[in-house]
Image: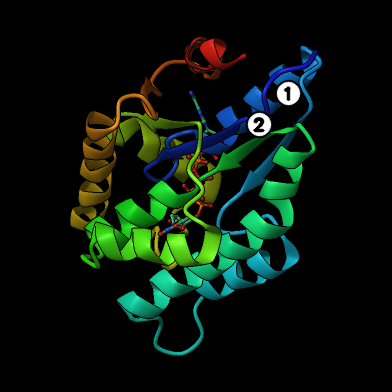
Amino acid sequence: MTTTARLIAFEGGEGAGKSTQARLLAAALEARGIASILTREPGGTPGAEAIRDLLLHPPGEGWGAEAEALLFAAARADHVARLIRPALADGKWVISDRFLDSSRAYQGAAGALGDGEVRALHAIGSGGLLPDLTIVITAANERVAARLRARDGGASDAIGGRGEAYHARVEAAFADFAAAEPERFVMIDGNGTIEDVHARVLAAVAPLC
Ligand code: T5A
């Protein structure tokens, strides 16, 4: 099936179900004959995966806000140049588990670096590439906490382990972004079964197919 290549990003707070839904969407597209690539941020290329490790398991005392934002932008620049742009040019859909809007929500809003600064780094690093659609998954905090306890047994990385107030600012930022740019964002209710949420994702993506 021939369609216009699209970049779709999944966003949201920790454990909302992004990876699960990104994987299911890529499989559903493939089943319809739409070639697609499933990738993630930070990561997606060998260089960006190495930066991921530095970000989530920082050596020494950890990164300051500016260094952290620069590292995310550097990882994204490599990911965009080496994987995302070539795939789109090849006519493939790219499904990314997190992208720019995570940097806007975590470093820009919750980390207080500022949205203009994060966007400026993205303009330098990745030519300002934006997703065709950003799917923000939200789910009730207690439900997500139970899912993550079952999966990770209470362990978390350097960013996931930040306090409740930080993660509340992240969630609020995603809602603000979606309200400000309704043509590029859709908010999806992540409560319910994996299949329920997948059906909502498919309905959101249908107009692009
Ligand atoms: N970050 C990232 C930044 O600060 N700035 C940036 O620019 C970027 C790109 C990345 C970290 O880096 C930060 C954000 C993060 O802190 P990550 O690996 O993407 O790390 O982090 P998480 O979002 O924490 O990833 P998770 O895998 O923990 O969460 P997901 O992908 O939202 O959730 P998922 O799909 O893995 O599901 C979690 C568990 O719940 C189950 C799954 O099977 C799994 O066990 N589940 C459900 N169970 C029941 N019903 C459903 N509907 C379910 N959906 C999923």
Q: Name the mark on residue 2.
A: none
Which residue in the rendered view is the most extreme toward the bottom? 60
Residue marked by disc 2 = 23
Q: Relative to the observer, which residue lies in front, 119 or 176?
A: 119
Query: Cα distance, mark 1 to mark 2?
Result: 6 Å
Query: Residue 161, how many percent across, how many down?
Result: 36, 62
Indicate left or right for 60 with 90 as reference. left
What kind of residue is marked 2? Arg
CA neighbours of label 1 inside 10 A, class few (<14), some (14 to 19), many (20+)? some
Query: Residue 141, how many percent across, how many down?
Result: 29, 36
Quarter of the image with the N terminus is top right
**What residue is drawn where x is 54% and y is 59%?**
126
What kind of residue is marked 1? Ala
Q: Is mark 2 within 8 Å of ligand 1?
A: yes
Q: Name the mark on residue 27.
A: 1
Viewer can see residue 130 = yes
Tell me, yes or no, whether the two marked residues, 1 and 2, touch with CB atoms within 8 Å: yes
Query: Residue 54, how many percent across, how many down?
Result: 55, 76
Looking at the picture, does residue 154 appear above or below residue 94?
below
**What residue is drawn where x is 48% and y is 17%?**
197
CA neighbours of label 2 inside 10 A, class few (<14), some (14 to 19), many (20+)? some
Q: Quadrant of residue 45?
A: bottom right
SS for dot 1: helix
**What residue is drawn where x is 27% and y is 49%?**
170
